[in-house]
Image (spheres, helix red, strand yellow):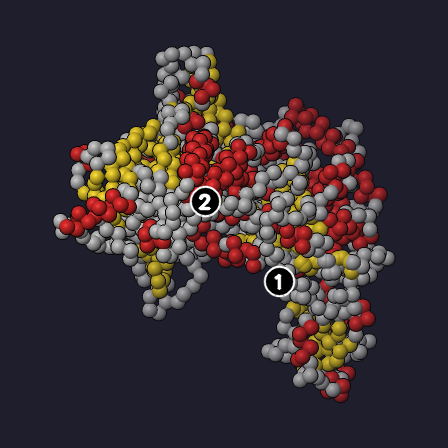
Amino acid sequence: MLPGTKPLRADTLQLRRSFLFKSTNPDPGVNSLAMAMGIIPLGVNFFPTVLLLLIVAFILLLVDRKMSREFREFRHENWTFEDVISEGRLAKSAFDRIQSATCRVQLALFLRDAASKRHWPVEAVENSCKDFFDIADLYSPVGCFRDSPVDRLFGEFSFHLPTASQNRTKLCVQNCLRAGFAFAGIEFGGAQCFCGSSHAEKLFRNRTIDSATCADSSNCAAGNASEFCRAFNTIFVYRTGAKKVPYVDKPVKFQPFEPSGDGNGGTNVQILFLLQLNGRDSRQIRRLLRMIFVSRHFYYVHVDGRREFMLKEMLTIERALEAKGFSNFRVAKRRMATIWGGSALLDLFLWTVAETVGGPDPKWTQWDYVVNLSETDMPILSLEELEHNLDRNRGFSFLKSHGYNTGAFLQKQGIHFHFMQCEQRMWRVAERRNYPDNIRLDGGSDWVAVHRDLARFAVSDSVLSSQMRSFFSSVLLPLESFFHTLALNSAEFCRRIVHPNLRFTNWRRRQGCRCAPLKPLALNSAEFCRRIVHPNLRFTNWRRRQGCRCAPLKPVVDWCGCSPLALRAANDLGKITLNLSQAKMHFFGRKFDSAVDNAPIAFVERQSLRFRSNNTPPQSVVSSSHWLNVFSSRTPSDVPSGINAEFLTRFISLTARLVLPNNCNFQQLNDVHIYWEFATAPPQIVATFSFEFGHVHYESQALIDQKKSFPTFYQAYRSEVIHEKVRFRFNDAAGAIQFGVGFDQKEEIFRTYPPLLLTDSKFTLKWRWELLGVEPGGHNSTWTSPPAELVLNAPNGSIFQRVSVSPYDSISGTQFAHFEFDRLFGVPSGVWSATLHANVSQQQNYAKILSVSFPIFSSSVDGGRAWNDEQQQQQQQQMVAGFFSVRSVCIATKSATNAPAGAPFLNFANCLELPWSTLFPDDKRTTDKMGIIKWQKLMSDLTLSCSRLISVEGLGPPTASSSIQLNGGGRIRPKGVPPPSPEAVTDARKCVNEIRAIATELNAERLRFGPINPSALWASSFCAPVYEQKDLFEMHVFGLRFSGHSIPLHDHPRMYGFIRPLYGRIRISSFSWLEPEEEQRLMIAERKQNRTQQIKGSSAAGVIRRPVRYAGDLILDGACTNPPIAVVEPNTANIHSIEALEDGAAFFDLLVPGYNNNRSCNYYNLSGDKAKFGIGDFVWLEGSEDVPQNFSMQQLEFDSFLMSSSARFE
């Protein structure tokens, strides 16, 4: 024993050994020294030194004193560490896996409290909700009935009773009551308990057994003759007191919203939005805020305690809003680790309520509802509709129930176990043996809309609330059941709950039932059980087949569970349509994930902002693009799992060498973003870095792509395989074998990019199959892939590892294999390869399917060679150049301002002009109101001017009769309508000039529309709808891919058009209609010459060959600061074509009024050579409603939208 130390008790010594030397990768040297000191038996050779011995002795002395202080309480309570281990296998398993001393102390304290019933120290609950529980019926005998294993009276839920129980009747009845069943039955012998709901009562009449048949004293346990049936295949039934299932008689219907003059539909409800944020996708959060942010609501933001990058982003928004005078956005200073199923989720919710209700700022106490949202939630319906429906159901809480057997739900939730959160994990530590009597449990979703009264009651000092909080501190997924159970056992709130939680979740089952027992309370809380309705107002995108897997949750919880899938436009948009969402009261949805598909976000953005259309991001070339930060020099320690920040910097520096001039030196990596050009595009990298030139630092960005040269990296041998007469084909279109880190097994994507594999990485290879069919004699199965073998080859060609891959069930046919090089030593860097083998015949012949090559870089030290080793540098540079390429590079404008003339990087493009750059204007992520006020003013003025112009000119919606004359164009007004007065003409001209002035202000910057990349288009032209005011006007941006492409000759019947160039030069060739008398004269002359012909394919009105007057050509240039506006009038220049004189030319087009069912565009062919015409010459056109065959127009995918006129902005 060392001087100054005290003798250690055996139990304390054993625990300290675990604290000190518990490690997944123990250091052999430290263990050897520990063995030498007698802490653990000697068994390995070591070379101790006096210095190391003294160091270890000093550490042991400090730890001994620390442990003595920490464990003094246990000795005082007569609780030893042997008691921890004796609590059972669950406690022992958790104790062995826990890494930190602090967490083990927490476990010991937790188990001590559980053993002493501190989580719920009362024997019974005074359940005061008479709607759902009648204590007079508790234990009331119903009778004896026939029952058998093949024909159960109660088939809904059952469980075995412990043989040692002295009161099995009470135990059975209480268990069934806890799950909400009206009846409890004990079978012959009293070993099993069955639960039945109230509808089972109709079965009693045909199964009743008389007393004589029931009695059989030979099979009756001593002292229990009156408690259960004695005859074989019989069951004795008791009532539990549970009267009915909650929520079934509480239908809640959607109340339509009608805008009113006050801008909010007449509601004054105020909402506290609790944003529970995780991850790094701050741009998606900004889009969420755009949809839900108004000044009268409150936004309390909690960022997971492990996420520093997201915290800085939210603090930036908080400061920006404060600078603009907004005080309703607050970022929480207290932070927790909000892991899946963690007890911290309930702690956060309750703490937020307490912090706002009892906080110093009186303004923050005024909310009516608290609604929690995650980073993957989005509104499906408008904020106005949410406000309106909450106001119509004021006082009720919206809690989603599980919707099926409560007993099975509670069992799947793990309610019968104690869980403890520590080390960012939920540990299953003990079985739950104690429940208070008369408690009614329920649960469903942890995404709720809780009324202020119930929320305040939950954080109050009432006995019921405090005991509930204590009980749920040891429950998995506590927020999924806390409010359900609290309200259900309170007569005041149990009828103030509505079933929808206002959300759609892409699943159909969000586990979350938590049973909360009550204390024998003398609490007058008799109001809440009547103030609950079932919907939680949300849609959840459940796909159980894919979302309910244990593997993704193993790192964070000792349990299996389900998680919804991200919505994908190809499969899920039909679930969140306007009519369906309104019918089902789905105001929010989850999950939305831009890394999977951002098209659904654009869809709900348009849908939810239809009453505030000015807040909808204007159409631009980056409307479908998304950027996700994976590294920031501001938070270098906060990087996604699988990213080595040190090597990432080195990788970018090696990549930058491919494009930087020799006299420019890479200095620092600032940011790395994953970039998706459009919703389903493959990921690319946008790296922001600093370099030095002439002792001055400049900032640049590079677009880095992964090469996909199949002859070099990918070779296919066979495509079809067969397994048990089921045929599969390798899915070549899925990108061959993909490699990477951070594989998400649920979404089947790599969360981490770029795929930088190191010699100490955990990485994954994945590929996909297509199911072709089943041969005769085969059978269908759930497997979507065959058994396979993956052979991993080292850089020298030798086989490094063989992995057998089992068949897998995936909704997309994915199959994958994991590799853990972090557990291996001596892994060489270089170009590795993997070969996939599978059975290709009925004879079980395995053959090559394909092979793929990929780079594995050295970690910080590889085989003794550091990164700065010359040979290592050369190898790494070759692999970077071989597998990655720089697609584009740009310079930040501010960086290049002071660059000397002749600097080699001055030919770099401006980052503000490249759509892939993070500096390119992206209005989707703008949360402030920059430019919106001006936009609203312009739209308001435009609405008035267009309305006057349409009225003066008689351009309203055409009737069916007038449309006959319109199809050919040419007449300003239908027959019989007199021409306007001179005053009206003057007024019309004034309106045209007003509209022209407004169109002048609608430049590319105002529209947030960036330059077009011609290579991103597949058609010769594109159309992007911008804004529409029904029956008044509509706006579009049109563009042409290459110089020479054109929009053919067409008209706009009885409409005005205003054309403003945005980018590049365009030529507009125009023709004007003739006055009716002049047109008729020329037509008669044409007939006399027998040249009139009916045009094949024309409309029913008979669009024929018609004379027009050539109005000339006009060239417009988007490079001009204030270019002229080309005006198309109902008669003048109404027929026109538009030709691009430069690649990527684009122009803004405003039509007054817009198109409708009776107004359509016609196309024309020109007779003769336009080059021979002079301005004012008569020419002949041949009209057709058919689109010319050589003309194609591309609608930008998922970006086109028509915004409604009822805009409201605060």
Q: Secondary structure at mark 2?
A: helix
Residue 567: % across, % down: 49, 50
Residue sitting nearer the eye, 479 or 1060 = 1060
Q: Is residue 414 above or below residue 74?
A: below
Amino acid beneath label 2 = Ser
Image quadrant for the C terminus? top right
Residue sitting nearer the eye, 1122 or 969 = 969
Residue 962, quarter of the rendered image: bottom left
Name the side, left or right, on which 1154 lies relative to 139: left
Residue 942: % across, % down: 48, 38
Which residue does the numbered mark 1 point to in the structure image?
A: 403
Residue at 59% over, 48% down? 259
Q: Is residue 815 above or below residue 402?
A: above
Amino acid beneath label 1 = Gly
Residue sitting nearer the eye, 1048 or 1012 = 1048
Residue at 66% over, 84% down? 206
Crowding near pointer 1: few (<14 within 10 Å), some, many (20+)?
A: some
Q: Is residue 820 visible?
A: no
Which residue does the numbered mark 2 point to in the structure image?
A: 951
Residue 1082: % across, % down: 20, 45
Image quadrant for the N terminus? top right
Name the side, left or right, on which 515 lies relative to 1190: right
Q: CA distance from mark 1 to mark 2?
A: 56 Å
